[in-house]
Amino acid sequence: MKVKIKTVNIKRGDGISIAMGGNYGADKYYASAFYTESRGKISITGTNDFNEYTISFNSFPANTYNLYVLIFFSI
């Protein structure tokens, strides 16, 4: 997943993080199938014009029911 993020005066906590994951279906009670995030790997803080950030994964289980993406501020 690639995103472009512009930051203004981000100083607290871990800054901005991006994440992507998926869940199994009802037969597995929507348990997590996979999850990956930028926290602890990529620093998105300070004041910056638009920069491109990428997170990736090699594969996910074939029976993954849904996918989701997150962009969040972590303090």
Image (cartoon, rainbow, N blue to C red):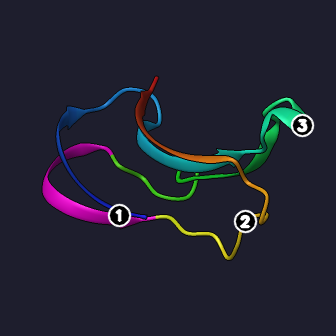
Q: Amino acid at mark 2?
A: Phe
Q: Nearer the viewer, residue 5 or 14?
A: 5
The verdict on residue 17 being magenta is no
Q: Residue farthest to the front?
A: 27
Q: Decide if residue 54 is on the left or right side of residue 9.
A: right
Q: CA distance from mark 3 to mark 1?
A: 32 Å
- The residue that label 3 is drawn on is 28
Q: Residue farthest to the right?
A: 28
Q: CA distance from mark 2 to mark 1?
A: 21 Å
Residue 65, position as x, y percentages in the image: 69, 47
- The residue located at (79%, 58%) in the rendering is 63
Point out which mark residue 72 bears. none
Q: CA distance from mark 2 to mark 3?
A: 15 Å
Point out which mark residue 53 bears. 1
Point out which mark residue 60 bears. 2
- The residue located at (55%, 58%) in the rendering is 41
Task: Answer above or below: position of 20 versus 27.
Answer: below
Label whose residue precedes the other's in the sequence (2 or 1): 1
Magenta-highlighted residues: 45-54
Quarter of the view holding residue 28: top right
Q: Is residue 39 visible?
A: no
Camera-side mark, 2 or 1: 2
Q: Residues within 10 Å of mark 2 (few under 14, many from 20)?
A: some
The verdict on residue 52 being magenta is yes
